[in-house]
Amino acid sequence: MEREDEFLQLEDAIINTLKTIYDPEIPVNIYDLGLIYEIDVDDENNAKIRMTLTTPNCPIADDIIAEVQHKVEAVQGIKSVNLKLTFDPPWDESNLTDEAKLELGLL
């Protein structure tokens, strides 16, 4: 049970970190935008993150990916980050959290 609690704490810390990262053109963090498809932490505290972008030709894709990599690597307890960018399935507005929809005036 203790190990499971540690995993949950690390995942929460990763989520909180991801909520500090924004696409400069959209006033919503990348987590609430629904750009994060998967977060997994293995037994050795290596994080695996599968994410997307709002569009494959995002002009700041490299900046966002580098920021995710750098900030999650800095989460206390995380040894490494394996970041996979995917466009399958493609992002759409249904990925937004209710908070993001409210922020963007879609609710």
Image (cartoon, rainbow, N blue to C red):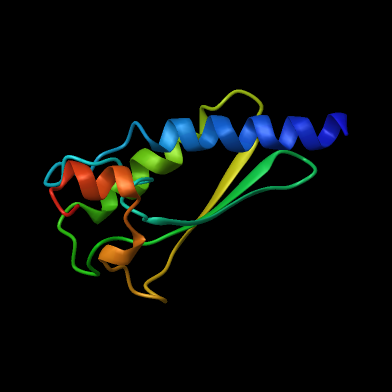
Say whether residue 10 is visible.
Answer: yes
* Left or right: residue 7 compared with residue 81: right
**Residue at the image position 15 percent from the left and 57 percent from the top:** 59
* Viewer-closest of 62 and 49: 49
Residue 86, x across and y down, in percent: 41, 69
Q: Can you name the residue that lies furthest to the top here?
A: 76
- Count of marks overlaid on the render: 0
* Viewer-closest of 68 and 32: 32
Location of residue 27 by image quarter = top left
Residue 23, x across and y down, in percent: 21, 45
- The answer to whether residue 76 is above or below residue 15 is above
Residue 75, x across and y down, in percent: 55, 27
Location of residue 91 by image quarter = bottom left
Say whether residue 63 is visible.
Answer: no
* Left or right: residue 21 compared with residue 39: left
- The answer to whether residue 21 is above or below residue 32 is above
Q: Can you name the residue that lies furthest to the front here?
A: 107
**Residue at the image position 29 percent from the left and 40 percent from the top:** 29
